[in-house]
């Protein structure tokens, strides 16, 4: 297990979800400031980080954003906080002004149906050698 970087935001994602894996690839492509590092929720480091923060992964099973230190975001807030950092997508921060309950209602519909709509892998994503440095569970 790699050391947890203190100066990077960590995206924990469902490693077997095709939608989540595509989202990670999208984040990497648009992370021009090299803000993020990644780990699957199913990995040893993903479990460690969620347990340390008391995050119930039976209720939040698709995306978690951990800021340096102990701050963290889940569901729609995690997605929008990530978008704020992406080249060309910072405008999405305005959705943070919508009520979180409304945002999470939409988010939960997508999360609940993600395997049916986008498919599921048997194993967690394996990054290319060039991207391995961005993944904490490799």
Image: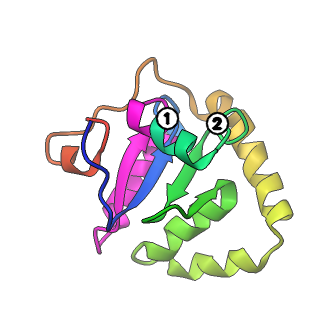
What secondary structure is found at the residue carrying circle 1?
Answer: helix
Q: Left or right of 25: which side holds 61?
A: right
- Pinpoint residue 106: horizontal percent, then vertical percent: 79, 54
The answer to whether residue 23 is visible is no
Q: Secondary structure at mark 2?
A: loop
Picture residue at 70% right of the left edge, 32% below the top: 58
Confirm or deny contact between disc 1 and disc 2 (CB under 8 A): yes
Question: Is the residue 60 above or below the residue 68 in the image?
Answer: above
**Vertical placement of residue 8 versus 114, above or below:** below
Q: Which quadrant is home to the C terminus?
A: top left
Which x, y percent locates residue 22? Answer: 45, 45
- Estimate the spatial distance between the alpha carbons at disc 1 and disc 2, rounded to whole Å: 9 Å
Residue 40 percent location from the top left of the image: 44, 37
Q: Which residue is mark 1?
A: 47
Question: In the displayed structure, does residue 28 sit left or right of residue 98?
Answer: left
Neighbour tally class for label 1: few under 14, some 14-19, many 20 plus, Cα within 10 Å: some
Front position in the image: 26 or 4: 4
Residue shown at 39%/37% (left/top)?
A: 45
Q: Which residues are magenta?
A: 20-47
x 47%, y 65%: residue: 67
Label of residue 74 in the image: none
Q: Disc 2 designates what residue? A: 57
């Amino acid at each position: 297990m790699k050391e947890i970087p203190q100066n990077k935001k960590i995206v924990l994602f469902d490693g077997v979800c095709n939608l989540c894996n595509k989202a990670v690839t999208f984040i990497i492509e648009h992370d021009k400031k090299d803000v993020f590092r990644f780990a699957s929720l199913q990995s040893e480091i993903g479990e460690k980080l969620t347990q340390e923060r008391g995050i119930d992964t039976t209720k939040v099973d698709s995306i978690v954003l951990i800021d340096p230190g102990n701050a963290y975001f889940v569901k729609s807030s995690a997605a929008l906080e990530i978008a704020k950092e992406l080249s060309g997508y910072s405008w999405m921060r305005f959705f943070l002004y919508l009520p979180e309950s409304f945002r999470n209602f939409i988010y939960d519909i997508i999360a609940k149906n993600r395997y049916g709509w986008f498919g599921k892998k048997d194993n967690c994503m394996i990054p290319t050698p060039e991207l391995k440095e961005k993944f904490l569970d490799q």
